[in-house]
Image: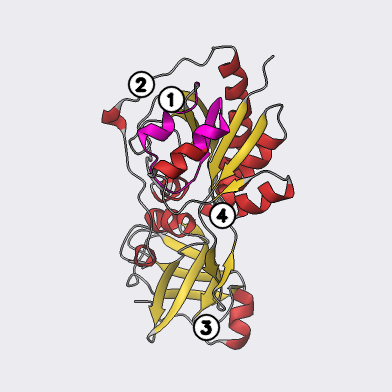
Amino acid sequence: MKKLRIVFMGTPDFAEVVLRSLLSGPDEVAAVVCQPDRPRGRGKKLSPPPVKVLAEEHDIPVLQPERVKTDVFLRQMEALRPDVLVVAAYGKILPQGLLDIPPLGAINVHGSLLPKFRGAAPIQWALIKGEQETGVTIMQMDAGMDTGAILLPASLPITDEDTAGTLFYKVADLGGKALLEALELLKDDNLPPIIQDGSLATEAPMLSKEDGHLDWSRKGAHLHCLIRGLDPWPSAYTFLDSKRYRIFSPKIVAGEVSEEPGTIVRADKQGLLIATGENYLLIGEIQPEGKKRMDISSLLCGTTLKSGQRFS
């Protein structure tokens, strides 16, 4: 069976997991394209993206264009002569001229079951919206935002304990496996496209820090999903005495609520039991302003949080 010549485009950890799976397969990764190195940390030192690090470990050429809509970059891609372009969380919309270069087109590993959750943060929004399952879609790329034809979907369940952090690796791992399956089907011309039903589409836009400000008057089920969907970033937060507390590891505790939403009903080694607009939330981990994330037992050793106090 013919070995495909692939150019891979991706940048963050999600793409690194997919690329690692691709490198375990039979096909040739001729080059990797990722975003330029960016300053990170307190020292603002230039750091390479995870995909670049992995590619260099395997002696694969790396391209890092600031812009993909240039004649120079298109000529570089044409010179690589890829059979197919594989994209996973690259971070920019690709022009049609680039997608038309490979004879077999461009396929994308998208972290949702399309047409649900088109956009930059599909894993987080699946949790925030309370979905019971998610997955990946191997899709044929076009010039739109995740609007191309579906080639191969693969699903997995979402548990009550999943966060964006845990689900991220499950989805990325599934994406790598689905990609290898799709490439084998593509070689046999056995990967028919299915046009998306645009009427079923939902959006998954980039998140901001402000999305994490908790409104305790909302139902406990809503807050439970929101907190997990924003863990680890940008994280959910609330205030007490003008101090910010980041909130993690929630559990719903059913009960008739008589306290004002945001009130701490109980504070012990089991967690913080907090009143919401419907039912209670038991919070297992917290990060006080200027400190590290910790469990509630550790918090109570050095901080006085007690029943009757109310988060705003």
> From what the image shows, is residue 145 above or below residue 311?
above
Q: Amino acid at mark 4?
A: Gly
For the point 47% across and 37% down, the residue is 75
For the point 68% across and 43% down, the residue is 60
Quadrant in the picture for residue 240: bottom left
Checking the image for residue 258, the label placed there is none
Quadrant in the picture for residue 1: top right
Residue 56 location in percent, x, y?
69, 50
Identify the residue under disc 4.
165
Which label lies toward us, 2 or 4? Answer: 2
Give the alpha-carbon distance from disc 3 to disc 1, as whole Å: 45 Å
**Callout 3–callout 1 Cβ contact below 8 Å:** no
Identify the residue under disc 2.
195
Q: Residue furthest left?
A: 199
**Callout 2–callout 1 Cβ contact below 8 Å:** yes
Helix, strand or loop status at disc 4: helix
Q: Which is more N-terminal, label 1 or label 4?
A: 1
Checking the image for residue 290, the label placed there is 3
Q: Amino acid at mark 2?
A: Ile
Q: Is residue 252 magenta?
A: no
Q: Nearest the camera: 59 or 226?
A: 59
Residue 138 location in percent, x, y?
50, 29
Q: Which residues are magenta?
A: 77-103
**Callout 2–callout 3 Cβ contact below 8 Å:** no
**Callout 4–callout 3 Cβ contact below 8 Å:** no
User: Is residue 302 at all visible to an observer of this figure?
Assistant: yes
Identify the residue under disc 1.
150
Helix, strand or loop status at disc 2: loop
**Callout 4–callout 1 Cβ contact below 8 Å:** no
